[in-house]
């Protein structure tokens, strides 16, 4: 194989696929990427056996073929080259990298030994979504996934496609986050699956800033996300393929309060700053006391540490209902508030032991966060 390609296009592609390549003592080939050529396309592939990626860009090729080389090594090297155009020539044992001022030979592995990355592409069942909006919704909830070894179903992100919307959910049993995204057109069929946490994070990192649409292909044991750059000079094409987590996701809607006894809206950034200030004085339980008092139009945050001292602060609110006070893990509280995209946040409380609900105030943002209090 021989391929002539713009250095910046290759550099960007390598920086993406090397994220998926992993160090493995038992299977060292996973630390590598597969480079293949076909017609006018150069394809970079990597896999960790749970997920795989194909990254295709425009190139001037002479012949078809493939070569396997260390991912991080090649990415670092290409990043140091100053020439704008690079020529790659691959054989079963060597990748030759030539540019105006450089000639380099890199030892390669047999491409036949590289794991096959499966794919699912039934266009009839493809679901089209905005790449940025979908990834943003995943980014709002993925931090809530559990690390449980005994309940693998809650270690991933639950994705449920309905006819007109998709719900993206995560929980660790102490809190729950749900993001709802309206679909541009009616979906022909309903699908649900649990996406592994790592895949969810990589999807956000790789496609989160990409304009335009992406297609999602779902099968019984895997899912494929395919993105094609709109009007991209390099004819950018990215496919991320992942296994799905086997298991039944809990009926999470049962834990979302249908109503709250006390409800208030307040400034999001002001609340974030006060939670951070209170966290400095939090005890070993990471506890802070939070209260809403609609009559005095005040929210109050109190934290106390027997070794350091105590702290209290207040914030103006607009609310309704009786005064409510509860203890929360400050970190969980902060994460829920921080994911609201609007300037004002609405908090609903159900006394000292009931779940609190956090969402954007007066908005159809579609983000909901449920937080259980720390019980005495």
Image (spheres, grey):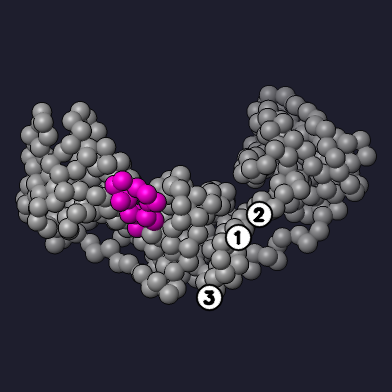
- Marks 2 and 3 close (CB-CB < 8 Å): no
Q: What residue is shown with label 1? A: 182
Can residue 268 be seen in this snapshot?
yes
- Gap in Å between the C-alphas at discs 1 and 3? 15 Å
Q: Main secondary structure of the magenta part?
A: loop
- Gap in Å between the C-alphas at discs 2 and 3? 22 Å
Q: Residue at x 83, y 37 (%)?
A: 317
Residue 348 in picture, x, y percent from top left: 79, 49
Please name whichever residue, 154 or 229, is drawn nearer the observer in this view of the structure. 229
Residue 159 in picture, x, y percent from top left: 54, 63
When the figure is inspected, residue 163 is found, relative to residue 328, above or below; the finding is below
Q: Residue at x 80, y 30 (%)?
A: 314
Please name whichever residue, 281 or 19, is drawn nearer the observer in this view of the structure. 19
Q: Earlier in the sequence, mark 1 or mark 3?
A: 1
Q: What residue is shown with label 2? A: 366
When the figure is inspected, residue 48 is found, relative to residue 104, above or below; the finding is below
- Marks 1 and 2 close (CB-CB < 8 Å): yes
Label drawn at residue 112: none
Q: What residue is shown with label 3? A: 189
Q: Secondary structure at mark 1?
A: strand
When the figure is inspected, residue 297 is found, relative to residue 160, above or below; the finding is above
- Which region is colored magenta? 227-239
Quarter assignment of residue 50: bottom left
- Marks 1 and 3 close (CB-CB < 8 Å): no
Quarter assignment of residue 323: top right
């Amino acid at each position: 194989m021989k391929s002539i390609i713009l250095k910046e296009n290759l550099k960007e592609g390598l920086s993406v696929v090397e994220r998926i390549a992993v160090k493995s003592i038992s299977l060292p080939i996973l630390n590598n990427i597969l480079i293949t050529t076909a017609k006018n396309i150069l394809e970079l592939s990597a896999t960790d056996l749970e997920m795989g990626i194909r990254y295709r860009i425009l190139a001037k090729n002479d012949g078809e073929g493939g070569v396997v080389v260390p991912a991080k090594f090649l990415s670092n090297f290409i990043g140091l080259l100053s020439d704008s155009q690079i020529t790659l020539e691959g054989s079963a044992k060597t990748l030759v990298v030539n540019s105006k001022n450089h000639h380099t030979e890199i030892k390669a592995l047999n491409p036949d030994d590289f794991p096959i990355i499966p794919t699912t592409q039934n266009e009839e069942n493809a679901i089209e979504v905005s790449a940025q909006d979908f990834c943003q919704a995943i980014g709002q909830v993925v931090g809530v996934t559990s690390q449980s070894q005994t309940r693998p179903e809650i270690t991933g992100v639950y994705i449920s496609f309905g006819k007109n919307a998709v719900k993206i959910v995560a929980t660790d049993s102490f809190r729950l986050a749900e993001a709802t995204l309206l679909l541009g057109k009616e979906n022909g069929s309903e699908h649900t699956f649990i996406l592994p946490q790592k895949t969810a994070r990589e999807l956000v990192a790789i496609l989160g800033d990409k304009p335009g649409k992406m297609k999602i292909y779902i099968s019984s044991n895997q899912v494929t996300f395919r993105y094609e750059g709109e009007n991209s000079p390099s004819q950018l094409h990215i496919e991320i393929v992942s296994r799905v987590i086997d298991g039944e996701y809990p009926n999470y809607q049962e834990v979302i309060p249908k109503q709250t006894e006390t409800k208030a809206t307040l400034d999001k950034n002001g609340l974030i700053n006060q939670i951070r200030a209170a966290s400095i004085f939090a005890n070993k339980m990471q506890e802070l006391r939070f209260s809403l008092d609609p009559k005095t139009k005040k929210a109050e945050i109190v934290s106390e540490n027997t070794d350091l001292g105590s702290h209290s602060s207040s914030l103006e609110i607009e609310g309704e209902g009786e005064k409510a006070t509860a203890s929360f893990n400050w970190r969980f509280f902060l994460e829920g508030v921080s994911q609201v995209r609007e300037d004002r946040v609405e908090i609903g409380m159900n006394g000292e032991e009931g779940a609190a609900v956090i969402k954007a105030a007066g908005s159809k943002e579609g983000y909901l966060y449920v937080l259980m209090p720390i019980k005495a």
